[in-house]
Image: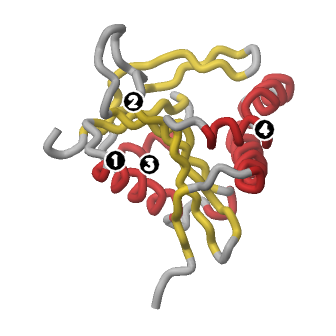
Amino acid sequence: MSSPLRISLAKANPATAAQLADLGRQTFQDTFAATNTAADMAAYLAENFGPEIQLAELQDRENTFLLAHMQNELVGYAKLRDNSALGLAEGQEAAGRLEIERLYVRDDWKGTGLGAALMRGILALAEQLHCSAVVLGVWEKNDRARAFYQRFGFREVGQHEFRLGQDVQTDLILRKGMAGR
């Protein structure tokens, strides 16, 4: 019997952009609203989530989106960026590095294995693309996400600033080297 979960590549169209904007806004709000001010959250959400913003992201050739649908309902997604310089010193080569910019799972789907299924999809794509590494930034205070990434072999290699509204926070930079590279 096949699973009703379907993970697929996103197509750049207004309907997908609207779904990504709604899910992105909701999951970010659900995850971080309790630990940030309402003003900082509102500023960040307005700057980063909207149908036109997500449509531009979908149309950017350096981005890839993996969508997780359960019975035709979008329940999670990953936004990936090719040739990421995240965590590299100036002048270092970014080619062959895939960045996980977002890995979002709806609150009611957390703990179900959906995030792990998306991560397996990301790592399979990185293999297909012959990536040397997968990198990401994760808020230093997001213990649940940090533990999740550690289970998949990601290790801390640095940190950088992340601006949420007026609040400057610290994101840890995590890296997973890909086999044979």
Task: Name the kind of residue labelled 2 in the image.
Answer: Asn
Q: Residue at x 73, y 48 (%)?
A: 17
Q: In the figure, 38 relative to 31: above or below?
A: above
Nearer-N-terminus badge (2/1): 2
Most extreme residue toward the top, as rendered? 90
Q: Regarding mark 2 in the picture, which secondary structure is present there?
A: loop
x, y percentage for residue 138? 51, 33
From the viewer's perspective, is 20 left or right of 39? left
The crowding category of the residue bearing disc 1, from other C-alpha atoms within 10 Å (few below 14, some 14 to 19, many at least 20), is many
Residue carrying label 3: 148
The crowding category of the residue bearing disc 4, from other C-alpha atoms within 10 Å (few below 14, some 14 to 19, many at least 20), is few
Q: Are marks 1 and 3 in contact (CB under 8 Å)?
A: no
x, y percentage for residue 23? 73, 51
Nearer-N-terminus badge (2/4): 4
Q: Residue at x 74, y 35 (%)?
A: 53
Which of labels 1 and 3 is toward the front?
1
Residue carrying label 4: 52
Residue carrying label 1: 126
Q: In the figure, 94 relative to 175: above or below?
A: above
Task: Name the kind of residue labelled 1 in the image.
Answer: Ala
Q: Regarding mark 3 in the picture, which secondary structure is present there?
A: helix
Q: CA distance from mark 2 to mark 4?
A: 24 Å
Q: How is the image coloured?
A: secondary structure
